[in-house]
């Protein structure tokens, strides 16, 4: 095996361990999860887990960080249509809103919130990290998109950070209520309804003046 192949194999194994660890932590909770169970789920020996990630606390931290990175990337992908200067604004907003809600309603995102809240007292710094890589990164990127739309005259002049905050609030507040704080999945029809209502309200406040 070449050095590059060995390095790739090590990275793949680490990713498999982190994915398995996140699933076990999500299903069992931090206190009840054990390293042997994570090793079994990842298809590796228990010493391999320790060799890659050390103790249980380190494994938990890295698993949550990896999940936050994935959710954050999915959130940014969800609003990709807002970068297109030629896209029809209302359609792009509706598509972005619905895709964002699907990300937030996913098993990974709901498990990430639950794990973060459950260990908030023990790992408050990890909660900040999760927010930085998910909601704060999304809010900053969305504000940039809305600022460009405002400058192009496609939205009325506004404070883009405030506009982004308002749009995200219109999406997440109803989702939290309908999902019972993330404890149940919301149907596609409900997600579309929340997305459409949010965009209607947002455009009534920030849409271009006629």
Image (cartoon, helix red, strand yellow):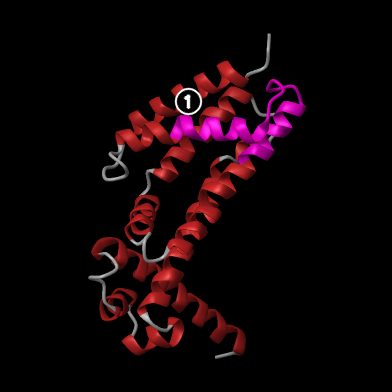
Relative to 107, residue 58 above or below: below
Q: Label 1: which residue?
A: 198
Of residues 60 and 11, the one drawn nearer to the viewer in this rendering: 60
- Quadrant for the N terminus, please: bottom right
Q: For residue 85, say whether it is visible.
A: no
**Quarter assignment of residue 150:** top right
Secondary structure beneath dot 1 equals: helix
Q: Residue at x 26, y 72 (%)?
A: 33
Of residues 70 and 87, the one drawn nearer to the viewer in this rendering: 70
Q: Residue at x 43, y 38 (%)?
A: 101
**Quarter assignment of residue 35:** bottom left
Horizontal and vertical percent for residue 205? 58, 18
Relative to 115, residue 80 above or below: above
Left or right for 30, reference 2: left
Relative to 84, residue 36 above or below: below
Horizontal and vertical percent for residue 209? 68, 12
| Magenta span includes 42 | no
Q: Residue at x 55, y 54 (%)?
A: 132
Horizontal and vertical percent for residue 102? 42, 41
Q: Which residues are magenta?
A: 142-171
Left or right for 100, reference 163: left
Left or right for 77, reference 66: right
Q: For residue 88, say whether it is visible.
A: yes
| Magenta span includes 143 | yes
Q: Residues within 10 Å of mark 1 (few under 14, many from 20)?
A: many
Dominant SS type (magenta): helix
């Amino acid at each position: 095996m070449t050095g590059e192949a060995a390095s790739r194999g090590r990275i793949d194994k680490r990713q498999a361990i982190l994915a398995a660890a996140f699933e076990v932590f999500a299903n069992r909770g931090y206190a009840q999860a054990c390293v042997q169970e994570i090793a079994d789920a990842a298809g590796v020996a228990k010493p391999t887990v320790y060799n890659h990630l050390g103790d249980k606390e380190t494994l938990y931290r890295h698993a949550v960080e990896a999940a936050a990175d994935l959710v954050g990337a999915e959130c940014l992908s969800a609003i990709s249509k807002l970068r297109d200067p030629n896209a029809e604004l209302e359609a792009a907003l509706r598509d972005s809103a619905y895709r964002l809600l699907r990300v937030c309603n996913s098993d990974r995102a709901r498990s990430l919130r639950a794990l973060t809240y459950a260990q908030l007292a023990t790992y408050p710094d990890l909660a900040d990290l999760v927010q930085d890589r998910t909601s704060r990164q999304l809010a900053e990127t969305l504000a940039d998109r809305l600022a460009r739309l405002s400058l192009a005259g496609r939205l009325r002049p506004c404070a883009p950070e405030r506009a982004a905050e308002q749009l995200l609030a219109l999406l997440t507040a109803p989702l939290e209520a309908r999902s019972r704080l993330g404890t149940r999945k919301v149907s596609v029809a409900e997600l579309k309804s929340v997305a459409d209502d949010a965009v209607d309200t947002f455009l009534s406040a920030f849409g271009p003046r006629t």
